[in-house]
Amino acid sequence: IEMEMARLDRLNLVGQMAAGIGHEIRNPMTSVRGFLQLLQGRKECTSFSEYFKLMIGELDRANAIITEYLAVARDRPVEQKMRDINSIVEAMFPLINADAINENKNVRLDLGEVPELLLDEKEIRQLILNLARNGLEAMSTGGCMAIRTSREGENVVLSVQDQGVGIDPEVLERLGTPFFTTKEKGTGLGLATCYSIAARHNATIEIETGSQGTTFFIIFKIAPAHLERNQK
Ligand code: ADP
Ligand code: MG
C-alpha cells in the first residue's frame, strides 16, 4: 500500500507539472500562431499558403491536446458530494444537442429514477461530454444518440448509445490508452480521461459494440448508507 501511495504521489506531481507546462507553452504558441496568420495574409507569402495552413493546423492540434490534457491532469483536489446524476446530464444536454443539430443528428435523454451518488460534478460533466462527442463523431451519416440512466440493483448505470460505425476489435483492445486515436484530428485523450474519472468514482466502464453502433456503460456503486435507506 505504501508503494502504491508513493506511486500515486509521484503521478500527481507529474500531472501537476505537466499542467503547469501546458499553461506556459500556450502563450508562446498563441503568439507564433498570430504571426503566422499575419504572414499568411501578405502578398509575398502567397506561394507558401499551403505551408501556412499546415503550420497553423498543427499548432491548433497541439493546442487541442493541451486543452484535453489539462482536463485530465488533476491540478485540483477531488470534490465528491452526493449529487443527482440526472440533473448533471440535463445540464449538459443543450451543449451536446448544439453539437448534434449542426450535423443533422439527434440526442435523446432517457433518465430513470436513481438515488444520489458521490460525484465530482465537474468530472462527471467531462465524462458525459467526452462520451457524447465520440458517439456523435462515430455517426458520420447521422443518427440518434441516447443518453440513459437507470438503477440496476446496487448500481446506477449511465449509458451513452450511438448508431455509429462500431469499434473494431484491434481498436477496442487499445481504448483508454492516452494519445491512441483513429481520427485525423483526434487527440486520443477523451477515453483515457473517462477511465481515470471512472476510477476515481469507483465506477467501471463496459462497452457493447457492433455494426449497429456502440454503447458505453458507466457503472456506479450506490453508497451503502443510501442503499439501506432505499430498501426499506
Ligand atoms: P479521440 O476521440 O480524440 O480519437 P478518444 O480517446 O475519445 O480520442 O477515442 C479514442 C478512439 O476510440 C477513437 O479515435 C475511436 O477510434 C474510438 N472510439 C471511441 N468512442 C467511439 C464510439 N462511440 N464509436 C466508435 N469508435 C469510438
Ligand atoms: Mg474523443
Image (cartoon, grey):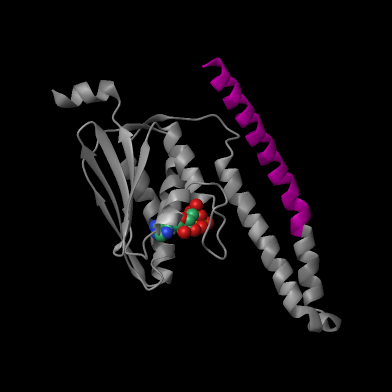
Quarter assignment of residue 211: bottom left
Q: Can you name the residue that lies furthest to the right here? A: 44
Residue sticking out furthest to the top: 2
Q: Position of residue 151 (x, y in %)?
A: 22, 39
What x and y, as percent, mark residue 74? 57, 36
Where is the C terminus found, in terms of image quarters? top left
In this rendering, the count of numbered labels is 0
**Residue 95 in sight here:** no
Please tell me whether residue 84 is drawn above or below residue 22 in the rendered image: above
Seen in the picture, residue 115 relative to 170 is either above or below; the reply is above
Q: Establish if 35 lies above or below 161.
A: below
For the point 60% across and 44% down, the residue is: 70
* Residue 26 on the magenta segment: yes
Tell which of 167 and 194 is nearer to you: 167
Within the image, what quadrant is residue 105 found in?
bottom left
Residue 110: in magenta span: no
Residue under the point 37% across and 44% down: 88
Task: Return the residue nearer the eye: 140 or 108.
Answer: 140
Identify the residue at horizontal 78%, vertical 59% (top origin).
Answer: 31
Q: What stretch is highlighted in magenta?
A: 1-30
**Dominant SS type (magenta):** helix
The percent coordinates of residue 215 (x first, y second) are 32, 53
Residue 48 at x, y percent in the picture: 79, 79
In this picture, residue 94 sits left or right of residue 24: left
Please indicate, yes or no, whether residue 142 appears anywhere in the rendered image: yes
Work out which residue is located at the far left of the displayed protein and give it: 232
**Does residue 195 appear to the left or right of 224 in the view shown?**
right
Q: In which quarter of the image is residue 9?
A: top right
Q: Nearer the viewer, residue 216 or 166?
A: 166
Left or right, residue 176 beside residue 22: left
